[in-house]
Image (spheres, rainbow, N blue to C red):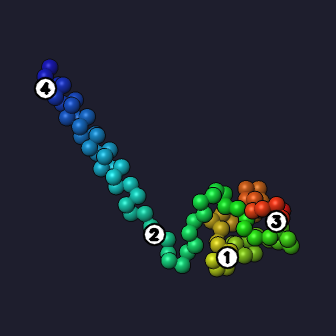
Amino acid sequence: MFQKRKGYVLALVLVVVALGVLVAGCGQNQPQPAETEKAQPTVYPPVITHSLEGRVGQCLVCHEEGSGVDAPKTSHPERANCQQCHVAQGAEQQ
């Protein structure tokens, strides 16, 4: 009986150690953004930070491939209805 209990305890210890190693290693090999890439926004979905006057429905003209820091490349160009999720920042830009 003691040997059986000892086996369970050993198995439990091994599982706990394996989980600890797995958790400690998470995020260690994450790719770092290139120095030229703009930092990811902290608000999701990101707000539209520019005026929409004369631009409604034209998001992908600049954002499909990205045209510099001011127009980052979209990660989902297949979704053309941007304002379904993204909203203008401030009432004056509606």
Helix, strand or loop status at disc 3: helix
Residue 79 visible to the viewer: no
- Residue denoted by label 2: 32
The tag earlier along the polypeptide, 4 or 1, is: 4
Q: Position of residue 28 (x, y in %)?
A: 37, 61
Residue 87 visible to the viewer: yes
- How far is the residue under mark 4 from the one under mark 1? 67 Å
Q: Position of residue 14 (x, y in %)?
A: 24, 40
Check residue 19 in the rendering and tell me which mark sits there, or answer none.
none
Check residue 93 in the rendering and tell me which mark sits there, or answer none.
3
Helix, strand or loop status at disc 2: loop
Q: Is residue 34 above or below residue 88?
A: below
- Residue denoted by label 1: 70
User: On the image, which quarter does residue 81 sit in?
Assistant: bottom right
Q: Is residue 87 above or below residue 9?
A: below
The tag earlier along the polypeptide, 4 or 2, is: 4
Residue at 14 percent across and 20 percent down: it is 1
* Circles 3 and 2 in contact, beta carbons < 8 Å: no
The tag earlier along the polypeptide, 2 or 1, is: 2
Q: Is residue 4 left or right of residue 26?
A: left
Screen quadrant of the C terminus: bottom right
Circle 2: residue type: Gln
The tag earlier along the polypeptide, 4 or 3, is: 4
The tag earlier along the polypeptide, 3 or 1, is: 1
Helix, strand or loop status at disc 4: helix
Residue at 22 percent across and 29 percent down: it is 8
